[in-house]
Amino acid sequence: SLFTRGVTQGMNIVTLAPLSYAQLVDTMEVNDGERRYMHHYNAPGYTVGEVKRMGSPGRREIGHGYLAERALTPVLPSEEDFPYAIRSVTEIMSQNGSTSMAATCSSCLALMDAGVPLSAPVSGIAMGLMMDGDTPYVLSDIADAEDFAGDMDFKVTGTAKGITALQMDMKVHGLPVAVLRQAIEQSKAGRAFILDHMLSILPEPRETLSPYAPRIEKLKIDPDKIGAVIGKGGEVINKITSETGAEVDIKEDGLITIASPNGESIEKALAWIKSLVEEPEVGKIYEGKVVSIKDFGAFVNILPGIDGMLHISQLSDKRVGKVTDVLKEGQTVRVKLTEIDNRGRLSLTMKGIEQR
């Protein structure tokens, strides 16, 4: 989206990715967290008519990005409702006012355009202050001269119903509560004015995602079965991703997300994972592989890690003298699960089951 307010202009680009692309957070305060929504802010020198060396972001760029990120975080959908990692990048094109508020507004529009179901749209405005002796004058939507010569730069972001983020710089020593209250109340009219213009272009989030966004399916499994999906040293999950082309992300609570631009690869990965965590069901017919043969029957693997016993009396409606007359190791057979005893042992039968 391209947001313009006076000379200030910001272009925002939103990228959607699987949750596995979320940023790991490891700081003194948080050492086991993730950021699934990131807002990065860039303001090159040309935006103010200067020639500057392009380098890593400074404190100003990082701070503006965090402010715009905080402004939208309260209205983002939950991870369960929208299992995507979201990266929002604001490129400031020119500036003569609050670029962090331009970043907030442009990111809101870009998220809505990308199909992210925000609970409410967000706008922002920068409030200023001029002190004439003891008389305060609160300014709305300050420009560069008012910011430079004024005594306050107070950013307020929010929806039509409330505030989502605040940030203040002051040059005076202390601020009366009455002035702070006036600035917040005065900002509401300004935010509403800007929000009305935003919604006249895009009234609500688009109902469908961009065709370039990966499609994601979710599956909740028993956390005890996570090991079966991952496999020893990640062998199973790596095989799933390499053979299906889908990306698989597993959370500790058993929530699995499968992502791919191709719907067919998602279906393949989903079916594969379901087969890994499926619970055996009495009366259901399975296609299994004979893993071992005994004098009294054979053991057949019907699900990953789950074998059942096929007694010699259940091989056929006719009398069978030796198990090897009917079965051999590695053979694929269709069997019905007839019973699970109180010790979890499975009994199978081939009687009445048509073999392919």
Image (cartoon, rainbow, N blue to C red):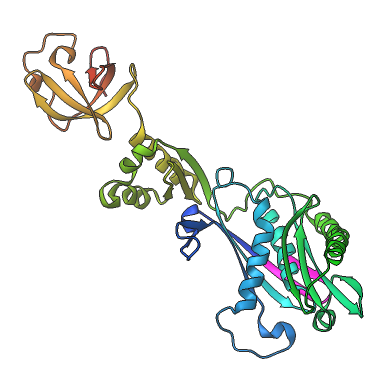
Residue 196, position as x, y percentages in the image: 85, 56
Residue 50, position as x, y percentages in the image: 70, 90
The rendered magenta stretch, by its main secondary structure, is classed as strand
Q: How many marks?
A: 0
The relative height of residue 59 versus residue 66 in the rendered view (above or below) is below
Residue 174 appears left or right of 210: right
For image coordinates 56% across by 47% down, the residue present is 79
Residue 328 appears left or right of 168: left
Toward the top, the furthest residue is: 318
Q: Quadrant of the C terminus?
A: top left
For image coordinates 81% across by 51% down, the residue present is 160
For image coordinates 63% across by 48% down, the residue present is 77
Residue situated in front as seen by the camera: 222 or 317: 222
Q: Quadrant of residue 320?
A: top left
Q: Quadrant of residue 110?
A: bottom right
Residue 242, position as x, y percentages in the image: 35, 52
Answer yes or no: is residue 90 visible: no
Residue situated in front as seen by the camera: 109 or 78: 78
Answer yes or no: is residue 130 visible: yes
The relative height of residue 88 versus residue 288 in the rendered view (above or below) is below
For image coordinates 81% across by 54% down, the residue present is 199
Stretch in magenta = 1-12
Residue 189 appears left or right of 49: right
Q: Is residue 11 magenta?
A: yes
Residue 234, position as x, y percentages in the image: 30, 51
Q: Is residue 227 magenta?
A: no
Q: Quadrant of the N terminus?
A: bottom right
